[in-house]
Every structure is written in structure tokens, then in C-alpha cells.
Amino acid sequence: MALADISPSHPRTQTLPSNLASKFATPLHFYKNRRCSVLPPLRRTPGILCSIAPNQVQAPIAPATPADAEKRRECFGVFCTTYDLKADEKTKSWKSLINIAVSGAAGMISNHLLFKLASGEVFGSEQPIALKLLGSERSFQALEGVAMELEDSLYPLLREVNIGIDPYEVFQDAEWALLIGAKPRGPGMERAGLLDINGQIFAEQGKALNAVASRNVKVMVVGNPCNTNALICLKNAPDLPAKNFHALTRLDENRAKCQLALKAGVFYDKVSNMTIWGNHSTTQVPDFLNAKINGIPVKEVITDSKWLEEEFTERVQKRGGVLIQKWGRSSAASTAVSIVDAIRSLITPTPPGDWFSSGVYTNGNPYGIAEDIVFSMPCRSEGNGDYELVKEVTFDDYLWKRIKKTEAELLAEKRCVAHLTGEGNAFCDLPEDTMLPGEQ
């Protein structure tokens, strides 16, 4: 693949005219163009290799030498050009580059998410990032189009874009891995079949993260069935902390907050302490017992118990399906927003007394939920990327019965994928089809 095929407007080298050299050698304008070249085709991944080192964004570098060829990394178009900052040009607020890997990067959810990441909306207006985008052979050309759009958006915080189809290359040094790509459920496909097909994808990605990602990488699994996919992923990454793996249930939490706000006649920021327990399926448990509106328990604000126990839960579960009926497309935009919310909940201190929902590994949980599964539970964070489980929650018979039902489903799903988690032969005894509407 020639460089001109990807970015015809960028020559391989560029030299400033002598009348401009002095202008751009002054502080705040200084930059160096690094040489890009197309290397022989890689065995597994098509891509463009350029001389970029991970620290070039925040530290001055020496002029290019032939030895630099060993440090070349895959990049795209204008991102093959490194803009260097001299030490005296740095501000006190300048931060080290964050490497963010995104699978399914040519899909609809990513089409909303990537631009939020690049704009600074997620990690902050002073945090430079590198995006590492994973696609498939079929989607690689579309992946190039995504990179072109990111180029044209001129985001100053977006310092690198790398694209590829091999997770062992794309996940190199990743500090955040947002695993969105998964096979959609086709007509007539059983849930057990989907677990097997997508489980193989996440087993491979777990192995790749284990081999090449940062040792403290935070992994957010979005592709469904996300709870069990997250379990498969972490089981195939034994050298990484199991606590760092999350299954996305934040969209369910956001939908539950919306429904409570509508019923109570308040704005949704008045709803707090909302928990989604269990699986991202129709067995999920939106917890109105511990939720609050204006700091008051929901059951004291909304006294219609029948609505809370029946209609409220059903509305949360079926929201995605209703949206498809109305609009003819899935909830890609709100899913992207919920990914942003989930990340920000981990990098921003949780407000005192509040918490958020995330599907996390159950080992050591204080609730009595079965261990060795990924289960959505209430979490809080100090803003350092880590979290702790909330202990001060209340259970009643209704809530606990619902929690045990979703627990049983996740244990059944775990048995279905035993061949992918290293626990022997798979045995599927799923009690019913609980895929959420809109995810088929």
C-alpha cells in the first residue's frame, strides 16, 4: 500500500523554505517533521510505519538517524509527523501521553466515541492522547476513513493515530482498552452460539492484552454479551489484575435514572445512588431500593410500588428495542456517552455518598454474590482509575430474589464458555433467552 493511497497530501519529507526557517524555530512554533516511509507488507497487519517514539510528545528528541528505523511505529497520515516541544516551551500543566486502544473502531459506537476522546471531553482539556484503532480485514478501508476524519478535525490533543487488524500490534502499551467490536446476533442464532462466537474474539484479545498492554491497563468490555465476554477476557489475561476489567452497564444505569426522573418530575441530575445489579440482559436488576431523588429514598418520593416493581424495570430493559422501533437504528450515540461516563467515573472522584454501576469481578465482594463471575455492582472511585465496592447498601427479599436470578444466569453463561476460560468442557444449560431487545 503506497503512502499516497492513504494521505496524498503529505509528502514523505518536508523541508521549510529558508525564509520561514527562522520563524518556526522560535518558541511556540518550533516543530520537526519526522520521515515517514512505507515498509514491506507485514505478515499479519497492513499499516504504515513511521518514526515516532512514545515520549516524543512531551520530550525533545535528537535528529533522526538510521538507527531510528528500529523505533518506527504504525501511524496514519498527518499523525506520522511528530510535533516536538522544547523543555522551555512546556507548561506546568502538560501531561504524558495516554495510549487508548479501541476495538470495533470503524463501527457506529466508535464513530461517536472517538471524537469525544480526541476532543478532551473524557480525559481533560490538557491531556494528550494516542488512539490505537483495531479493525478487521473487511473494515480496514473504513478504518482509514475514520483516521482521515480524525485528521480533518484538527484536535490538538490527538498526537497519534495507529490503525491495524492485529490486537498484538494495536494493543502495544495500551493503558485503556475499550473493547467494542463484537459480532451482532444474527437471525435464528441462539444466545449460546453468540457466547461462543464472541467469546473466541475476547479470548484472543485477552491474550493480546496480557502479552503487550501496560501492566495496569484498564479494560472496558462493551461487545455483548459483555459480562461473560469480560470474564473470558480477564481469564485469558492472567498477568493483568482481574480488578481492572469492566463490563459496561452504565447505559442501563443512565436509562434507569432517566425513568425515575421522568416519573418523579425532576431533572435527571437529582437522581443518585442508582445501581444496576447483575447481567446486561433482561435479568438485570435496576435497584430502586437504594436509589435516591434529591437525597431522599426513591420509595419515599415515588410511592407507586407496582410501577417500581414492574413497569420501571421493564422500561429500562426494553428502552433499546423501543428506540430501534422509533428511529430504525440502535442506540450507538447513548452507548458512546455511557462509555464516557464509565471512564470518567474511574478518573474523577465519586461525589461523597454517591456511587456508580460497573460490571466487575466478584471475588471478595461483600454481598454474598457468587465469586468468579463478572457482575454489575455499586462502585466508587477516588479518581485514580481504581474503584472499591460500596458496602452501605440495603437488601430486601424482592431485591435479593432478583439478584439471585441474574446470578444464576451468569453462572450458566460461565459454564457455556468453560472451554474459553480454561475450565474444561463447555456445558450450556441457559434457562431462557434473555438478550436485551435491540441487541439482536
Image (cartoon, rainbow, N blue to C red):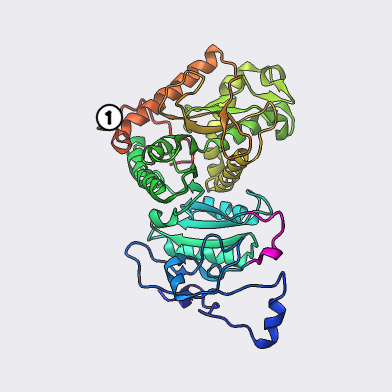
Above or below for 142 versus 175: below
Q: Looking at the picture, tell me which residue is in the foreground, 151 or 25.
A: 25
Residue 345's spot in the image, x, y percent?
62, 38
Q: Is residue 32 magenta?
A: no
Give the left or right position of residue 92, taking residue 42 as reference.
right
In this view, 309 is above or below 75: above
Q: Position of residue 54 (x, y in %)?
A: 52, 60
Residue lying furthest bottom:
18
Q: Which one is nearer the viewer's eye here, 370 or 288?
A: 370
Residue receiving disc 1: 427
- Tell me the kind of residue under disc 1: Phe
Q: Quadrant of residue 393?
A: top right
Q: Which secondary structure is most common in the magenta stretch?
A: loop
Above or below — where is 336 with respect to 380? below
Residues drawn in magenta: 85-95
Is residue 56 visible in the rendered image? The answer is yes
The residue sitting at 49% across, 41% down in the picture is: 438
How far across and down, in percent of the image, does residue 87 sit? 67, 64
Residue sitting farthest toward the top: 397
Q: Nearer the viewer, residue 93 or 198?
A: 93
